[in-house]
Amino acid sequence: MDDPVVHTVRVVGATHHFPSPSAIFVEYRDGDELRSAARRLGVPLVHEPWRQLSESLVRIKPGVETSPPVRGGAPIEKWDAQSRRFTVFEIRTAWPSGLYRQEVFGRFRYALHSQDKWYKTNHAEGVYIIAGQNDELIRWRPDPTDPASAPGTLIVDNGVSLPDPQRRAVGLCTGLGPKIGKHSRNTRYDNVPRDIAEAVANSLRQPLTLLLETSGGENGI
């Protein structure tokens, strides 16, 4: 039996991100060759780890109750769903519902305000919790060369990001990092099956928008 062919892909990330890990791809003809390659590489052999991770995703929800931002402290910022960024918020009489952040001891503290209560959260999850069902933050497009095939592209809107569990699940579909759209700046994860995309969207309390038709440019990316 010939040794399997192993390819290492060096991933170059953007300068403002942490360095992306390299990916190793193995060419093999049967299960024995694949198991042999795993032993040579010193790694466990796991079948479809992205599917296992997607099945373990839990629907996000607000954290425990907490206190509101401190008036008179560092500037208070509120998430603006239109611009997809935090803007300085001047509190006058009442706190509108929404996602807030305030720097405390050099780190941002995030809190959700809903029905006169405050809840702990983080940036990534808080954005999805307050998002409406019509915001279309997550999209999926089938492979334009073979629309009937299972894998496609998961597209996350500009200004938002996936929480770590969801990002790991879709990232393992290729083993490579996401791509950023040249014009829209959306984040794109390739080779994601539709059922995995639906599991991710459901865990983030969002409907999955299907892009079944493509046009020029970046095809909606």
Image (cartoon, rainbow, N blue to C red):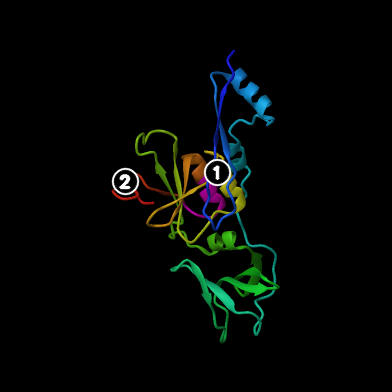
* Residue 74, image quadrant: bottom right
Q: Nearer the viewer, residue 79 or 67?
A: 79
Which residue was labeled with disc 1? 171
Q: Nearer the viewer, residue 197 or 87?
A: 87
Find residue 138 and report its horizontal and vertical position in percent.
Answer: 46, 53
* Residue 42, image quadrant: top right
Residue most extreme to the top:
1
* Residue 101, image quadrant: bottom right
Find residue 132 and report its horizontal and vertical position in percent.
Answer: 48, 62
Label 1 crowding class (10 Å Cα cut-off): few <14, some 14-19, many 20+?
Answer: some
Q: Residue at x 56, y 61 (%)?
A: 129
Residue most extreme to the left:
216
Which residue was labeled with disc 2? 214
Image quarter of the N terminus = top right
If you read the primary sequence from the N terminus, does the residue marked by circle 1 or circle 2 appear first? 1
Q: Secondary structure at mark 2?
A: loop
Labels 1, 2: front one: 1
Label 2 crowding class (10 Å Cα cut-off): few <14, some 14-19, many 20+?
Answer: few
Find residue 180 and report its horizontal and vertical position in percent.
Answer: 45, 52
Q: Which residues are magenta?
A: 198-207
**Image check: 151 left or right of 11?**
left
Predominant SS of the magenta segment: helix
